[in-house]
Amino acid sequence: MKEFIIEENEAGQRFDKYLAKLLKEAPKSFFYKMLRKKNITLNGKKATGNEKLLKGDTIKLFLSDETFDKFAGTTQVARAYCDLDIIYEDSDIIIINKPAGMLSQPADDGEPSLVEYLIGYLLKKGELTEDQLKTFKPSVCNRLDRNTSGMVCSGKSLSGLQFLSRIFHDRTLHKYYLCLVKGNLDKPAHIKGYLHKDKKTNKVIVSRQEFPDSLPIETGYRPLGSNGKMTLLEVELITGRTHQIRAHLAGTGHPLLGDTKYGNSEFNRQYIRHGVKHQLLHAYRLVIPETDQTFTAPVPELFFKIIKEEHLEEVYHENLERSMGLRKNDHSSGADRDSRK
């Protein structure tokens, strides 16, 4: 006999959904049969599987070790380890400043992503156990392109994941990015369009007109300063579609510096000697009005180097001081953060 006590991260789901995670190799017919025969019980009583689990509920499985091991499976949840730049953390959520080059979520090539690094971090910290991973897996709630840096929100608990999922879905979380774009922009704008993804090329097409399988997109931007040949923009991502900022701004004639997929090759070529090999796009500010919280992550060193060399340093710092309350000499991700609880 094996006994399991429902913890907070497992509460709120249907009993059969929990069993499907615990006995992931078993056909549904197996645990429904075991429920009917009372070989699986809930709080010592016969159950049907559609009960909603509560914290503290006791589940007993009257199965042999061989049967349990067979249906529980032995696949280990992937994890990886590295130093994470943590912007904010509490018992339910963690906001991580992802570097350019790191995947947000797992891909088919097996390369570690932020999800595996998050799991490794929580296991090492002792806030997560191997047994808990059988029925609950922490995960990220928003996705940045591999070569886009900045803040990614992750849920450490079920309530954290639910909270983040809700505010992303309801768009009550405001997401702001910094980028350098080609040309001179001197007025704020709110642009709309339609986006269609070509899965074969992994590129998107942006149009002003709706067409089959397209999705509506909205992007707001505010110029912070320009030197004539490029502009430092603050971009608000109102809808969050694949490559939205990169493709939408390129479609207006102002591609991002370093963007090899949607950008201007001649514009990019001028900065290769500076080490620019990917788009300079950084998710730098998150605002949650309903909880009066603001989180910030200043741009990476390479991004700041270009800002400084293009004589846009002053407007960058002015924006930080005005919007984030950072000291003028703080431009690394280790700067003070305004995270009002």
Image: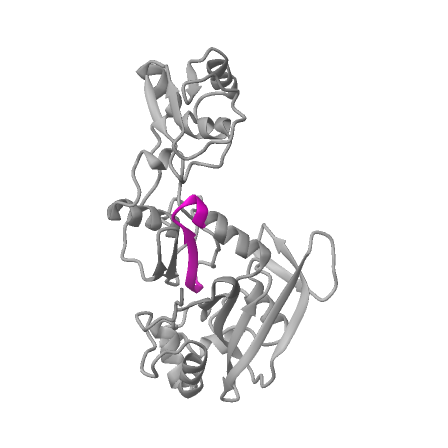
Q: How many marks?
A: 0
Q: Quadrant of residue 150?
A: bottom left
Q: In the figure, 331 relative to 1: above or below?
A: below
Q: Nearer the viewer, residue 191 or 200?
A: 191
* Residue 113 drawn at (x, y percent): 38, 50
Q: Residue furthest top?
A: 37
**Considering the image in quadrants, where does the N terminus appear?**
top left
Query: Is residue 216 rendered magenta in the image?
Result: no
Residue 311 visible, this orientation: no
Query: Is residue 152 rendered magenta in the image?
Result: yes
**Considering the image in quadrants, where does the C terminus appear?**
bottom left
In the image: residue 262, left or right of residue 126: right
In the image: residue 126, left or right of residue 171: left
Q: How is the image coloured?
A: one colour
Give the residue at x 32% y 78%.
Answer: 330
Q: Quadrant of residue 209?
A: bottom right
* Residue 202 drawn at (x, y percent): 55, 54
Q: In the figure, 16 relative to 229: above or below?
A: above
Q: Nearer the viewer, residue 205 or 177?
A: 177
Q: In the figure, 228 relative to 134: above or below?
A: below
* Residue 149 drawn at (x, y percent): 41, 64
Q: Quadrant of residue 254?
A: bottom right
* Residue 120 drawn at (x, y percent): 30, 47
Residue 309 visible, this orientation: yes
Image: magenta residue range: 147-160
Give the residue at x 31% y 82%.
Answer: 329
